[in-house]
Amino acid sequence: MKKVIEDHSVAAQFHDAVHEWAVVAVEEHPDNEGECVCGQQNLLYMYTIYNSKKQETLSYIGSQCVHHFKRQDLDMQVSVFSQLLALKRAIEDRKKITLTSDYFSRALLEWLFAEGAFNNARNGYNGEEDYAFFLKMFNKRKKEDISAAQNRKIWVMLNSQVYPYIRDHPALG
Ligand SMILES: [Zn+2]
């Protein structure tokens, strides 16, 4: 695996090369038969990584191999993408979804904001306030403190905006 990464990086040595990469997409193999660039088989979650210096993607790579990069931020990206995929499946299966840690996390909300998922005509395509609102509601330990109006706003934004965004996002297979 180190050789594959070195061959696709600007830096010659693996421990330098790892800093050129980010996790950008995930796909789920329907029969657990995904294969990592290292040759490891039977992957369920297959990640795509992107080299910012070469502007090239490399796929697929398993979460275990990403872990070998020994970068906490990459491990976090893997975690966010797997959460996003779980959320996408729940949306597709029409499960009851709430703004709790069952399906959401602060890192997932941050990803949605960075991708522009909270931008809409009403907020002038600047989703910053709506992101702050979602974060505040997510962080509330007592969910009964969330008012009916706030719950309505959460529901409307999730259904009209966030869910279609996740369902149609090209990085979530
Ligand atoms: Zn591997």
Image: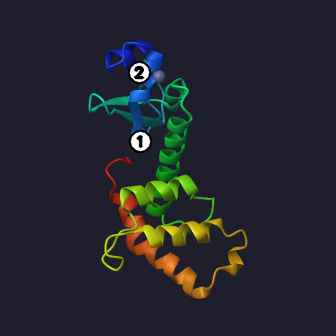
Along the line of sight, which residue is nearer the eye, 4 or 118? Answer: 118
> In this figure, which residue is indicated by the disc labeled 2?
17
Relative height, residue 69 to residue 120 (above, below): above
Q: Residue 40: tell me if it is visible.
A: no
Along the line of sight, which residue is nearer the eye, 167 or 49? Answer: 49
> In this figure, which residue is indicated by the disc labeled 1?
26
Secondary element under disc 1, as helix, strand or loop, is: strand
For the N terminus, the quadrant is: top left
151 left or right of 173? right
Relative height, residue 14 to residue 108 (above, below): above
53 left or right of 100? left
Amino acid type of the residue tagged 1 in the rendering: Val
Amino acid type of the residue tagged 2 in the rendering: Ala
Residue drawn at 52 percent across, 83 percent down: 152
Few, some or many residues within 10 Å of mark 1 (<14, 14–19, 20+) = many
Secondary element under disc 2, as helix, strand or loop, is: helix
Residue 62: x and y in percent read 47, 30
Mark 2 vs mark 1: which is more N-terminal? 2
The reply to whether the residue tagged 1 has its Cβ within 8 angstroms of ligand 1 is no
The reply to whether the C-beta atoms of the residues labelled 2 and 1 are less than 8 Å apart is: no
86 left or right of 61? right
Q: Residue 52: tell me if it is visible.
A: yes
Few, some or many residues within 10 Å of mark 2 (<14, 14–19, 20+) = many
